[in-house]
Image: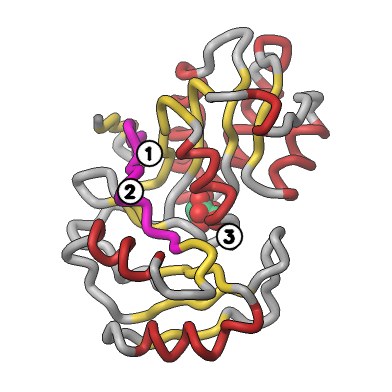
Amino acid sequence: MSPQDLAKRQAAEAALAYIEPGEVLGVGTGSTVNHFIDLIAEKRLVADIKGAVSSSNASSERLKQIGVPVLDLNQTGELSIYVDGADEANPALQLIKGGGAALTREKIVAAASRKFVCIADRSKQVDVLGKFPLPVEVIPMAQSYVGRELFKLGGKPKLRDGVITDNGNVIIDLHGVAITDPLALETTINQITGVVCVGLFARRPADVLIVGSTDGIQTIT
Ligand code: 5RP
């Protein structure tokens, strides 16, 4: 396992402590979350979990494989805990997410959860968000229009080739914007017609960030 992968696994292992027995768990998407799901099985915690609401078809499959029932958010009501990774996190625990194209369902599950526990390796920590291209999920027929509107914001929009989201939409990644006001940019992009969701988690940041590294675990609240 590479040092980065080990750091992801450490962060994922620390997040196991947030699982509330008998509760429905929110589960995100990505390689760090894959460690979290694998660890639920390895540490024999499956029986503690009533079920999970997942942010992607990929995570749903992985959860089912270890025996965790995957539930519909419309049937569960509010979730106590949501565990997910991030592409970048700033000191206010605002995030860029969507590197795995699951941003819309991730934002929905995060919004419906009382506590969002973000798990990441140290490379994801930044002072200012935006080095990682900002993912925007877009209705396919609006792709060109939204691209032109994003261009006006000062960055370089690029269609993510060959990617269709679980919701049947496309992803435009906005490159080269230093996000000094995440709340304002989230609002601006949300208001572009044809945008389904922007992968900026500023209105609903993480509540806890668990950072894994070769030096150990750091928990930031
Ligand atoms: C998926 C995401 C992931 O949380 C993000 O891309 C981090 O992934 P990884 O854990 O593989 O580094 O937002 O849409």
Mark earlier in primary sequence (2, 3): 3
Q: Quadrant of residue 143?
A: bottom right
Estimate the spatial distance between the alpha carbons at disc 2 and disc 1, rounded to whole Å. Answer: 6 Å
Foreground residue among 142 and 129: 142
Residue 160: % across, % down: 58, 79
Which label belongs to residue 122?
2
Q: Are marks 2 and 3 in contact (CB under 8 Å)?
A: no
Q: Are marks 2 and 1 in contact (CB under 8 Å)?
A: yes
Could you tell me if the residues under marks 1 and 3 are in contact, i.e. CB atoms within 8 Å?
no
Please say whether residue 210 is one of the residues in the magenta stretch.
Answer: yes
Residue 119, picture quadrant: top left
Q: Nearer the viewer, mark 2 or mark 3?
A: 3
Task: Please tell me which of labels 2 and 1 falls first in the chain.
Answer: 2
Q: Which residue is mark 1?
A: 212
Above or below: residue 89 compared with residue 73:
below
Q: Is residue 65 left or right of residue 99?
A: right
For badge 1, the amino acid type reads: Gly
Residue stretch in magenta:
198-211
Q: Amino acid at mark 3?
A: Gly
State the separation of the CA atoms marked 2 and 3. 18 Å
Q: Quadrant of residue 46?
A: top right
What amino acid is found at the position of numbered circle 2 in the picture?
Arg
Provide residue 203's location: percent of width, then percent of height. Answer: 31, 47
**Regarding mark 3 in the picture, which secondary structure is present there?**
loop
Q: Measured along the vertical axis of the image, is residue 201 above or below residue 179?
A: above
Asked whether mark 3 lies closer than 8 Å to ligand 1, one says yes
Q: Residue at x 65, y 83 (%)?
A: 141
Query: Is disc 1 surrounded by few (<14), some (14 to 19) or many (20+) residues within 10 Å?
Result: many
